[in-house]
Amino acid sequence: MNKRSVEQIVQAVGGKENIIAATHCVTRLRFALKDEGKVNKEALEQIDIVKGSFSVNGQFQVVIGQGLVDKVYNEMIEMTGLAKATKQDIKDAAEAKLNPLQRAIKTLADIFIPILPAIVTAGLLMGMNNVLTGQGIFYEGKSFVDVHKEWADVASMINLIANTAFVFLPGLIGWSAVTKFGGSPLLGIVLGLMLVHPDLLNAWGWGAAKEKGDIPVWHLFWFDVQKVGYQGQVLPVLVASYVLAKLEQYLRKRIPDAFQLLLVAPLSLLITGFLAFIAIGPITFAIGNAITSVFVAIFHNVPAIGGFLYGALYAPLVVTGMHHTFLPVDLQLISSTGGTFLWPILVMSNIAQGSAALAMMFLAKDEKLKGLAFTSSVSAYLGITEPAMFGVNLRFRYPFISAMTGAAIAGMFITINNVLAPSIGVGGLPGFLSIVPQKWTPFFIGMAIAIIVPFALTYAFGRWKRATN
């Protein structure tokens, strides 16, 4: 690293006067800029220490690399005289520039990203259980535990550990959502767990209980309230968390400090709890089921079109950040129908982006681009696509379009074959562990399509472009 490179980065992002605030993470510089239109991306990506750049959620991020980014950031701060900022400062500055839709999408991202490690871990563990209990994987017509009964309780324990994150999902969402909305995280956990209390009718048994006319109720004066839990549900705890956080903030401003410990938390939780079971829960439960029904109807009636379009559009959704809006839908589908048909298509899209980037490694003459294309393709194959998309594929456009094409074809194929994921895991090559074992064969074929088609299209178009220029 030299001072000249840092100067070039500052100039490429529009100069010191265009920087509102700057910080860094493990590998990237993060800028909140006054006008991203002033960024010279071509000049930026020609700088020897820059490995790529992209804009997301109002932040402009420059990929530098682990270790070196600290030195670059410190040199930049000393050179420009900017004050050091935290990640939250950058988020706040960037959020101020977002429109209402972008702000809503960012809010969902801020809520679900912190709990993703727990969900993905649960998905991987459920995949292990699938391998042990799925019929026909190791033995014809039998599962591994059917033949080796001594492993049955091991599988059962793995399943319990894996299921915990999904059974108590409202607790995880409550913690993250209330924190995001400015309330007490502990109250968010209590709220979420309250919605899945064992005294309530399990949400997964609600349908059967309704058919029998055997749903338990609370008799509250002149009306009855269903005594139903919200296991696996997303919308009830999201809305209740917002109400809890805002109610807590309201009470803290109006209740004297001497009485806050005695009154704020009990009143916030009590009022939100009654509202959750009387109004918020039933209404959002119905909305969640309606959303699920719409997606199920589309993919049931026109699976080829649904799979093709979602496969084609998932990568552009990632570019805009709107892909975060589909994680709640995946969780709702898993809760309501036992599996999601959307998440397997996500895997196809991620693999396709990696394959397009890998083709660029063979096409590139520049050693820096070769290295970036290879490392970003490996990252995409393991479920992290941003380096491949922003550092390589979008930069040249045709690899991105090739990846979209391959993902669309793969998405259509696996949807036609009714591939389902009963859990969410690693959105890359290890993703098969989260697929029901009976559908591994079409899923593997879909993966092959997502690898071969984008690679072939990118390589062929790259060679043609080179020959015609």
Image: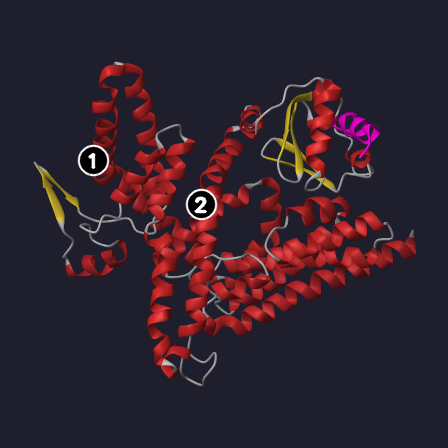
Q: Mark 1: which amino acid?
A: Phe
Mark 1 crowd level (few <14, some 14–19, many ≥20, 10 Å Cα): few
Q: Is residue 47 above or below residue 84?
A: below
Residue 235 sits in quarter:
top left
* Residue bearing mark 2: 115
How many numbered marks appear? 2
- Tell me where residue 236 appears, x and y as whole percent: 32, 42
The secondary structure that dominates the magenta segment is helix
| Left-right relation of 382 to 113 | right
Residue visible at 72% across and 21% down?
78
Q: Does dot 2 land on a helix, a strand or a loop?
A: helix
Q: Is residue 169 above or below residue 262?
A: below
Viewport quadrant of the N terminus: top right
Residue visible at 75% across and 44% down?
395
- Residue 355 is at least partly visible in this image: yes
| Left-right relation of 212 to 365 | left
- 10 drawn magenta: yes
- Foreground pick, 323 / 296: 323
Mark 2 crowd level (few <14, some 14–19, many ≥20, 10 Å Cα): some
- Tell me where residue 90 appears, x and y as whole percent: 58, 27
Q: Is residue 113 above or below residue 450?
A: above
